[in-house]
Amino acid sequence: MAKPEPSAFLPAAGLPIVWAGQNAWRCLDTAYGSGHAFVKVWDAWRRDDHRPRLLHYVGLCAEAPQSDALLEAAKAEPHLSGLVASLAHLSQTITAGFHRYSFEGGQLLLTLCMGDLSKLLRQQRFQADTLLLDPDPKLDRSDGRWDLWRVKALARLSRRGAGLALRGHTAMLLRPVLQQCGFVVPDKNSSEPAGVVRAEFQPAWVLKNSRHDAIEPAVPVTRCVVVGAGLAGASVAAALARRGWQVVVLDAAATPAQGASGLPAGLVVPHVSADDCSLSRLSRSGVRMVLQQAQALLQQGQDWENTGVLQRFPSGNDDSPRPPPIWHTQAGWVKPAALVHAWLAQPGVRFLGDCAVAGLQRQGGLWRVLGTAGQVMTVAERVVLANAHGVLPLLDACSNAETSWTSELTWPVLRTVHGQVSWARHADSPLEALAALPASPVNGAGSLLPRVPLTAGLAWLAGATYQPADEADPGEQSQHAANLSRLTRLLPDLAAPLATMVATGEVQAWRGSRCVSADRLPLLGPVTAGADQGLWLCAAMGSRGLTLAVLCAELLAARWGAEPLPVEASLARALEATRGRSNAL
Ligand SMILES: Cc1cc2nc3c(=O)[nH]c(=O)nc-3n(C[C@H](O)[C@H](O)[C@H](O)COP(=O)(O)OP(=O)(O)OC[C@H]3O[C@@H](n4cnc5c(N)ncnc54)[C@H](O)[C@@H]3O)c2cc1C
């Protein structure tokens, strides 16, 4: 029996006709294989004048996609070579887990998920519009993979009316199971075993809300107010605007990025831990996502650089053996303010400065956002509080009945931690210091960015200190000394020349404040548990706003749009804003 090519699955699924005029479309491909079917869908989306604004493609795979096979398959289709080249380059190095790639200015999102099929299905939280059941020709006898439990998992991820394209002979073999789970399968006589057929998720029963467990229904795309124009707020605004939202971003300061995101330049590097904790796993996804944004929006070499970063594990006070250094290829430095400005300049986003938000009122399904004189500054269907340390004072100032917020609902800990970066222009640094600068950024005990082109000139930056807000401020010089002491362990050759510079006052300081949660993970989700009233938090980026802001923004937008999540559902849950609150509503 001839194996149907992946391209046969598109017309069987009704693509591209079924997605015409839709705001967003979500495809689930249960056997991504080389990515051939994805490239076909991408190409169809590109050519279609009525394409959806946003196309999600989730590809499940047991092993890393074979780029050679894709390049080979594309030889016969030279018009696909551009798409194939960009894809082959990206997916070579993937490891187990979820990997999000952004194309076409963020309008086409690929989520590659590698691992065991059942586990991958369990970690999805979205409602698919189109499902491709094993379009990879290698899985021609794939039906053995599809027992009742896996088909049930597919049904859980299908919206009513979703189309499922599958081989004719698979449809015949799985007919009882598919029907039991709510799929309408074409008549036996009308299916061609060697061809591809379309089943439809059209259960004869009323779908219970509990069916979707934690899959939240999509909210209508309307207006949103974001409070705070730092990395967190600006990235949320851009992610929503890409999906058609009208977003107003308010900040108490006159211009954006005046809080912690005013940091001259920061490190973007995965967090490393012996147990590969949630922060480590989230940071790997976050780094990839922010570097893609930087690549798309910023000037390389001027606003950011994918330099790679050396992670060292310098010895502490004990003599325990230290792990060998790690070289992170996907890492570098980014100027946060440049990203914030680029996000706020996206169509659909409006920034309003000098707008300190002092209250929120809910009236007729809308949020009224109040200024310090009680005036209504703007109204919207939804509000995101991305104002870091400003979150709790603002919530406490809001009327309990309207926000469902009561001051007893505090998080166990949401701390302010001040910090200082020490920096100097190369032009002001002695030759011994310049000679001892490493070729690329180093992270470990503190960090060092050796070459960043600031407005003042080419500079090195070392940091940063951690000074809890409830402790006395030790002053700028003492903070320089703290940064220097960590550098002594990280890069001993730099210590002596920099000590001289600190002593002679040639080192500059940049100071800011981080908003940190108890478990060092951001808070992302509705302010209160229970019915979603449209008041959300995106805050507590801690020391890793650059790494985590894009991930959080995409996660928020995905949850609002019932879209595929950029990370495993269990990881997304770790960020829930109500976590750890024993008295969550
Ligand atoms: C010294 C130091 C070094 C750092 N180094 C790094 C690094 O190398 N890599 C990295 O990834 N991260 C680093 N960080 C962390 C990073 O800077 C933060 O995680 C990130 O900037 C936080 O972004 P944010 O948008 O949550 O907060 P902010 O940038 O602080 O933005 C909050 C905004 O909310 C506004 N606001 C507050 N209240 C209100 C209100 N009521 N109404 C209207 N507006 C309001 C504020 O004006 C502010 O603009 C560092 C931080 C510090 C302090």
Image: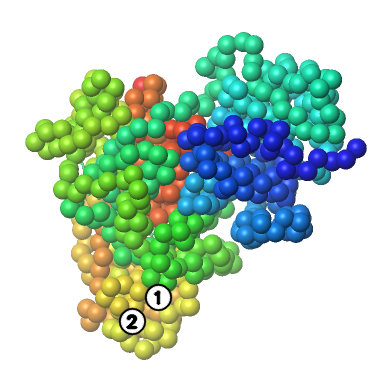
Q: Which residue is mark 1?
A: 451
Q: Quadrant of residue 489?
A: bottom left
Q: Which residue is mark 2?
A: 426
Circle 1 crowding by C-alpha within 10 Å: few under 14, some 14–19, many from 20: many
Q: Residue 533, how many percent across, how many down?
A: 34, 25
Circle 2 crowding by C-alpha within 10 Å: few under 14, some 14–19, many from 20: some
Q: Residue 399, how many percent across, how many down?
A: 20, 25
Q: Nearer the viewer, residue 228 or 127?
A: 127
Asked whether disc 1 touches disc 2, contact meaning CB atoms under 8 Å apart, the reply is yes
Q: Residue at x 91, y 37 (%)?
A: 1
Judge whether residue 266 can be spotted in this image: yes
Identity, as a three-letter code, of the amino acid under mark 2: His
Residue at the front extreme? 49
**Drawn side of residue 185 relative to residue 21, left or right:** right
Q: Nearer the viewer, residue 122 or 471?
A: 122
In the rendered image of this protein, does residue 365 appear above or below residue 336?
above
Q: CA distance from mark 1 to mark 2?
A: 8 Å
Identity, as a three-letter code, of the amino acid under mark 1: Arg
